[in-house]
């Protein structure tokens, strides 16, 4: 019985550790990022750039974003280029949302 308990504890610890390692933006909230994405109409801009399907900007084979830091850099670039009213501390929320939805970058 003791062996089973130890195994369960070890497995739970491993799962929690993997979840933490899988999130490159641990202090950010993807739900907040989604709200910001919607409020600032990021999708409308992406739709116009991609001929109506804004999600293609994230999923196209030749996309420039190859890791979590490049994703955050691209979010900053877009915010600066469009003049979107996004606080600097909220850019990680946006990146966390995009990573959760499209990129799935590990830490």
Image: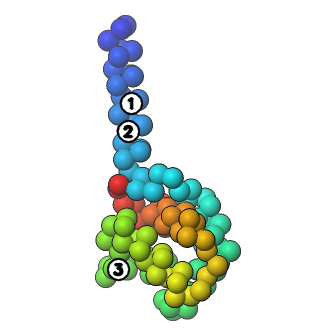
User: Which part of the image, by quadrant, shows the C terminus?
Assistant: bottom left
In this rendered view, identify the residue nearer to me: 11 or 33. 33
Image coordinates for residue 22, horizontal then vertical, percent: 38, 50
Above or below, 103 against 107 in this view is below
Circles 1 and 2 in contact, beta carbons < 8 Å = yes
Residue 63 visible to an observer of this rendering: yes
Circles 3 and 2 in contact, beta carbons < 8 Å = no
The residue drawn where x is 42% and y is 52% is 23
User: Which part of the image, by quadrant, shows the N terminus?
Assistant: top left
Q: Nearer the viewer, mark 3 or mark 2?
A: 2
The residue drawn where x is 64% and y is 79% is 85
Q: Residue furthest right?
A: 39
Image coordinates for residue 56, horizontal then vertical, percent: 45, 80
Graded by Cα atoms within 10 Å as few (under 14), some (14 to 19) or many (20 or more), the crowding at tag 1 reads few
Tag 3, which secondary structure? loop
Could you tell me how far apart the alpha carbons at marks 1 and 2 are, in whole angstroms? Answer: 6 Å
Q: Which residue is mark 2?
A: 17
The residue drawn where x is 39% and y is 15% is 5
Image coordinates for residue 69, horizontal then vertical, percent: 37, 67
Graded by Cα atoms within 10 Å as few (under 14), some (14 to 19) or many (20 or more), the crowding at tag 3 reads few
The residue drawn where x is 36% and y is 42% is 18
Q: Which residue is mark 3?
A: 63
Graded by Cα atoms within 10 Å as few (under 14), some (14 to 19) or many (20 or more), the crowding at tag 2 reads few
Could you tell me how far apart the alpha carbons at marks 3 and 2 are, in whole angstroms? Answer: 30 Å
Image coordinates for residue 87, horizontal then vertical, percent: 60, 71
Residue 50 numbered mark, or none: none
Q: Which residue is mark 1?
A: 13
Counting the numbered discs, the total is 3
Q: Earlier in the sequence, mark 3 or mark 2?
A: 2
């Amino acid at each position: 019985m003791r062996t089973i308990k130890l195994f369960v504890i070890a497995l739970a610890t491993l799962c929690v550790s993997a979840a933490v390692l899988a999130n490159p933006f641990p202090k950010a909230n993807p739900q907040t990022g989604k709200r910001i994405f919607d409020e600032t109409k990021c999708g409308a801009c992406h739709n116009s750039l991609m001929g109506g399907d804004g999600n293609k900007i994230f999923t196209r084979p030749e996309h420039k974003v190859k890791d979590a830091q490049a994703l955050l850099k691209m979010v900053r670039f877009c915010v600066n280029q469009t003049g979107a009213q996004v606080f600097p501390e909220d850019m990680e929320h946006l990146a966390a949302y995009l990573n959760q939805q499209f990129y799935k970058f590990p830490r």
